[in-house]
Image: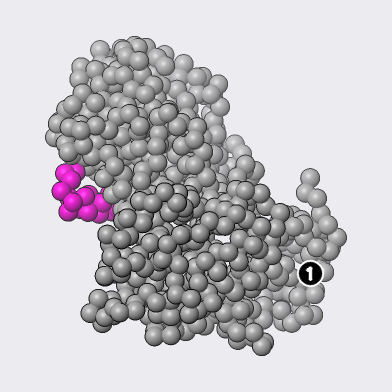
Amino acid sequence: MVKRSGGKPDKAVLSEMPMRFGDDPLLWAAWLYYEDGMTQADIANLMGLSRASVNTYLADARTRGLVNIEIEPDRFRSVMIAKAMKDRFNLQDCLVIPSEGGDRSLFERLGAAGAQVLKRLVRAGDTIAVAWGRSVLSLAEELHHPGLADIRVVQASGSTTARIPWTPEACAARLAEALEARWVPLSAPAIVSSPEMRERLLAETVLSEQMVVLSEANRIVMGISSMRPESTIHTSGFLDGVDQQAHYQDAVGSVSGRFISARGEPVIGPVNDRTIGLDLAALRAIPQRIAVAGGIEKVSAILAALRGGYVNVLITDAASARGVLTADGWQEPKRRSQVPAPVVDGAAPRVHHGGDKKLINEARDIVDESIDGLLLAHEPLLAKVPGTHRAVMARNGPRSGKVGIVIGGGSGHDPGFWGYVGQGCADAAVMGNIFAAPPPDPILAASRAVHGDAGLLYIYGNFSGDVMNFDMAAEMAAAEGIRVRQVVTTDDIASSPPDARGSRRGVAGNVFVFKIAGAAADLNASLEACEIVARRAADCTYTMGLALEPVRLPDTRQPSYEVGPDEMEIGVGIHGEPGVMRQKIVKADDAADLLLDRILSEMAPVRGDRVALLINSLGGTQTMELYILARRVRQRLKAHGIGVHRTFVGPYFTSLDMKGVSLSLMKLDDELITLLDHPCHTPALTELGEQKGGK
């Protein structure tokens, strides 16, 4: 039962309020009713209030002038712009404050807003890196949030000139004081006289230990500097004695003392190798990157930082945000002109379905926190790929002279893809956001980490984002002298007809291809031989799935499509795609027959053929049900005269919490059998050798 209060939402509920509403629950309630079309009952459940309290909130919103048949335009625009920024630049969150307001300067008001945001985000055990600037110091001075244990605050760069009050050490020390946290300085200047001096200082024990703490940061608080003469990067002394026109003419701004172009790319000049602190790659690897920046003069710098992916939580002002959006080609959508007034027992036009229950913290952190946990749980087998938080590598497996196997795709398919990294299987796996392709940079980082001078084989499913990003990573690797071949899996027979197999999706059959390619590489096959046998395994693999209930994404908790209580969806995808047909639910044997018959009709095996069989849970199907299906499939294959060399049953390649199952068959030959039986040791798959008949 949801505990409801009389007049105020519970603090825990307020912590879930989207950042764009600031600390105003009335604005949140008005938005949910008038813009999102939620019923008062659903709003009450979401906010932890009684329905009567929600009605009072809506009435108060009208009295206060927030709503006059529509949300007050200026407040609406701030919320709307914040949402547009969040969506357009794939931010975790965004808070937009008015550009004008009261006697306080914009820096002071941005600092107050930033302090409000940091209170919501900081957790016990955090290591927070801190850059410098006027807004950052203002945030630290506005913040008072003691009581959290084991927090460390570390400077993101060495010390700067004392000509300004917002130095790196002042910002970090003040923030540590506000959090009652341990302060870790960087005991060196931010800019030193030469690259050789930088290397000597970094080799010193004290600074080396401090840099280790900086590398462990899970959040950073920073400003964004323009390149104007009065900007922070100039007043900090970074460009003293440097010909900016000669070396930094392409720079439009800087973050944490590093210069970036309008496209967000690093601008390298004479200061770069003399700087002590975070570089841009290390900055981008920090899971939560909070920037506090505003003012029209910073629009190009803020846009560059967003394009480069250096920021994923932004606190800014309305004029700056609108300028950033406009510069990026955004057009403000038209609002509907009128919305209904609240009625105590009435309903707004659209009805929102309730979400399911999840044991998570924040939806935006689910991938990174899951990777943190799996690295700890499987520490003997897996290690983090240097330079990225979204790739893991095998502790045993990569070696000189061996082809490296790199796999990857979107998160949400656990134990895919990380579960198939280990000796005798893949050497590295790269994960994107939920159901989203990993970017090229972590793929390249994984490639650098595991190539052993024999080349790399990329294996991934046939999804447009994966194809594009792995192709880009392959080009980048080739530019560094790393040979790359690619195999794209296409085993989902429901996604296109047989004569268009090249456009099919790659789904649970991936597991077979990973295993075959990894075994070939472990046996020191050449890159060309690994590619050939992996491609043959992919061509011999067929998969089809069904769902009883669709997947629900962690952020929305809403089903990806609707399935009736007595229906099932046939031919579903693994990213929430609906099936090719819907029918009444049937008994387990009939469901097994439906999937198997479709596969056999295309595979066209003959009596005496051998196959590997995978009965795969899509996330929410119980093991008991899987074995009931396995029983029926084995019976049917025996009746067809088809030998089952190996049977795999379990959640090998899931789709979050989808209640469903997929069936995969790989038609075997002698070489594929040898490679399938080759020993491997990964978190999700351990083979000790030939074990015919089942697993």
Mark 1 closeness class: few <14, some 14–19, many ≥20 residues within 10 Å: many
Q: Between 92 and 355, which is closer to the camera in this rendering?
A: 92
Residue shown at the point (46%, 16%) measured from the top left: 631
Query: In the visual, does 478 lie left or right of 443?
Result: left
Residue shown at the point (35%, 32%) measured from the top left: 395
Q: Which image quadrant for residue 675?
A: top left
* Picture colour scheme: one colour
Q: At label 1, which amino acid type do we have?
A: Tyr
Residue shown at the point (55%, 68%) measured from the top left: 171
Residue 407: % across, % down: 32, 39
Q: Which image quadrant for residue 173?
A: bottom right
Residue 573: % across, % down: 42, 42
Query: In the visual, does 488 lie left or right of 278?
Result: left
In the rendered view, would you say 68 is above or below 288? below
In the rendered view, would you say 461 is above or below 49? above
Residue 619: % across, % down: 51, 35
Residue 404: % across, % down: 24, 36
Residue for badge 1:
57
In the rendered view, would you say 334 is above or below 385? below
* The residue stretch that appears in magenta: 467-484
